[in-house]
Amino acid sequence: MTANIRSTAARKFGRGTQQLCRTIMVAFKGVWTQPFWKAVSGEFLAMTIFIFVSLGSTINWSVDDSLQQAHIVRISLCFGFSVVTMVHCFGHISGAHINPAVTIAFVCTRKITLAKSLFYIIAQCLGAITGAGLLYLITPTNVLGTLGVTLNEGLSVGHGLLIEILITFQLVFTISAVCDSKNKEKSSTLAIGMSVIIGHFFAINYTGASMNPARSLGPAVIVWKWENHWIYWIGPIIGAVCAGGAYDYIYCPDSELKQQLKDTLKKATQRTKGKYTEVDDTRSQLDTDDLILKTGTIHTIDIDQTERKRGKDSESEVLSTV
């Protein structure tokens, strides 16, 4: 009796393990490819160059420690044109997110899978730390400062958080607009760079104008300054998600996606006699360069037939992707 129970438990455990492995493999489908790892390495390299060059502009070599207007212009232009350059260089390789907040917004708007986004964010953070570390090595300590990790002393944490939300919102809304195929304007990368520039013009004196969690993480790790660091993660992420959602689902929604979501919601909540509706996720990730997820199909399943099949191992069960 005990042997039978153990045997049954072992079989159930084995099936559960196999199903978990299949789920993980399907979730990370498209990750184990050469083009994807080129994209990840591209994000790392782009972020390293961006942080190294841009943070270099924040170094104050003058005797006066105050932030002069000329310094603000220099910093703003350097960050903006660095973004334009990196997007030109790496846009066709990885999409040139170079910002975890942008990547998270793309996850929420179904432009990249969660599994892929994890590797992107890790590469971005490591690139930011590398770039800040290289700058730290070549810069005299007496002029190093905080590498742009700054919250104005006269500003409350709440106000700083709000500033980061607002400036990241306008940045990601701009990115969403210029990446929209319906937008026929040709100066897309320049528009993104201008968005970064105006964000810095406005917010340098408030929070240092991060708009990018990795851009703040790199210097924080190198100079080991973590005071109020959380606002440079929470603020940009909230602003980016709100901007991406507002553009893709309110202002310029995709008509086909909108109709599919309506049909899915209607059929998923519909209840009929002896039947229910089930949504099968058949999204494909075969093309690793295609970051747009495909929506699933809907099937109606008879409950009575399902009851008769209870107990059978559902080898054909569709595994959902991330």
Image: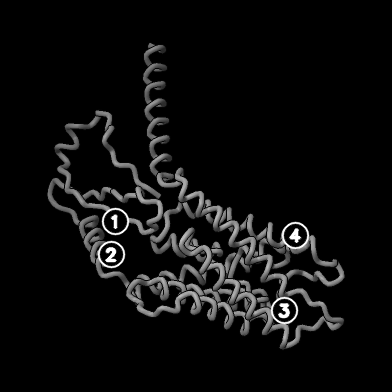
Closer to the camera in the image, 258 or 80: 80
Q: Position of residue 157 (x, y in %)?
A: 66, 74
Alpha carbon separation for disc pair 1 and 4: 43 Å
Residue shown at 21%/52% (left/top)? 298
Alpha carbon separation for disc pair 2 and 3: 43 Å
Residue shown at 27%/33% (left/top)? 314
User: Judging from the image, what secondary structure is the residue with disc 2 in?
Assistant: helix
Q: Which dot, 2 or 3, sits closer to the camera? A: 2
**Residue count near mark 3 (Cα–Cα under 10 Å), binned few <14, some 14–19, many ≥20:** few
Q: Marks 2 and 1: in contact by CB < 8 Å?
A: yes
The residue wearing badge 3 is: 152
The three-letter code of the residue at mark 2 reads Leu
Residue shown at 48%/72% (left/top)? 172
The three-letter code of the residue at mark 1 reads Thr
Task: Tell which circle, 4 or 3, labels the residue nearer the N-terminal end.
Answer: 3
Q: Position of residue 135 (x, y in %)?
A: 75, 64
The residue wearing badge 2 is: 257
Question: Mark number for residue 222?
Answer: 4
